Image (cartoon, rainbow, N blue to C red):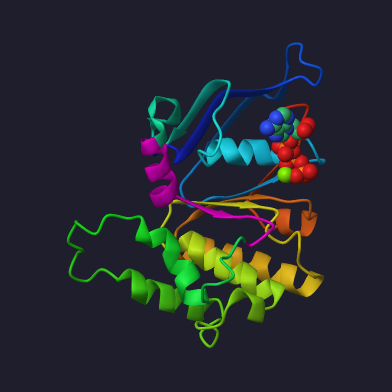
Amino acid sequence: MPAPLLELKEVIRRYAAVGGSGSVPVLNGVSLAVASGETLAIVGPSGSGKSTLLQIIGTLDRASSGEVLLCGKNLAELDDLQLAEVRNRQIGFVFQSHFLLPQCTVWENVMVPSLALPKTLPAAKDAETTEARATRLLKRVGLGDRINHRPGQLSGGERQRVAVVRALINKPQLLLADEPTGALDYASATALGKLLIELNREESVTLIVVTHAMELARQMSRVFELRDGNLVATA
Ligand SMILES: Nc1ncnc2c1ncn2[C@@H]1O[C@H](COP(=O)(O)OP(=O)(O)OP(=O)(O)O)[C@@H](O)[C@H]1O
Ligand SMILES: [Mg+2]
């Protein structure tokens, strides 16, 4: 069996208790292995630690103890600069709020993550340029005629699709989505869920979705519930 893309071993995350004495574990020994190309949903009540877990996986937060391995690399051994590089190259994020830059066009917004990549390495001859990838993906998500619009001129569903393309622009191995459909109406939410699954296959990106929407969760190949700080597989 190939090594998993992502592995969590006994991950604990504590926060200081309100009132100042001691700490409370939000994640209490989470272990998980995710193979490349998988789709996975994490559900659970508000405050159960879903965002905390996704942020630790996404290198935005560190575990209090335990290990997080991405492509076999222990994230705890990386300094902040190395973590930033992992985050930019290997991981794409989509949140409930799109966080697009309002003054920039759709095109400029999706190109932003690529600006931080060094341009020193010569690309393979047949490699798709970032510009071509941006155009192709924007067309793919149905925004070919919105490329020069600004976020304020788009619907909520369209803005989320821009956010998805921006998350994919650097060809990440892992796409993390925290309540990606949480701010959308039913039709837009259904369409975005379908799109995420299709892009998982087409772009070979592993997908982890945190959601309250069981309909979206059920479209993933595995569903876990975060309960009392641990992941429980649901039927
Ligand atoms: N920086 C922090 N400092 C202290 N406590 C925190 C911090 N971040 C989160 N928590 C606490 O950790 C718990 C889990 O929060 P988290 O945001 O991960 O929950 P969630 O499952 O994503 O909830 P929701 O569904 O409402 O988004 C909550 O009790 C929260 O108050
Ligand atoms: Mg949350």
Above or below: residue 232 compared with residue 161:
above
Q: Position of residue 109 (x, y in %)?
A: 49, 68
Q: Position of residue 192 (x, y in %)?
A: 66, 68
Q: Is residue 85 magenta?
A: yes
Residue 4, picture quadrant? top left
Q: Residue at x 79, y 37 (%)?
A: 47
Q: Is residue 88 magenta?
A: yes
Q: Residue at x 42, y 42 (%)?
A: 84
Residue 234 seen by the camera: no
Q: Position of residue 99 (x, y in %)?
A: 61, 60
Total labels: the figure holds 0
Residue 208 seen by the camera: yes
Q: Residue at x 39, y 33 (%)?
A: 72
Residue 219, picture quadrant? bottom right
Above or below: residue 136 compared with residue 37:
below
Residue 85, picture quadrant? top left
Q: Please identify the quadrant where the N terminus is shown.
A: top left
Q: Please identify the quadrant where the C terminus is shown.
A: top right
Q: Residue furthest top?
A: 21
Q: Position of residue 188 (x, y in %)?
A: 73, 73
Ligand 1 lies in which image quarter? top right
**Which of the pair 24/221 is nearer the observer?**
24
Q: Residue furthest bottom?
A: 145
* Left or right: 60 in relation to 41: left
**Which of the pair 191/20 is nearer the observer?**
20
* Left or right: 59 in relation to 186: left
Specify the segment rendered in magenta.
81-98
Q: Residue at x 44, y 41 (%)?
A: 5
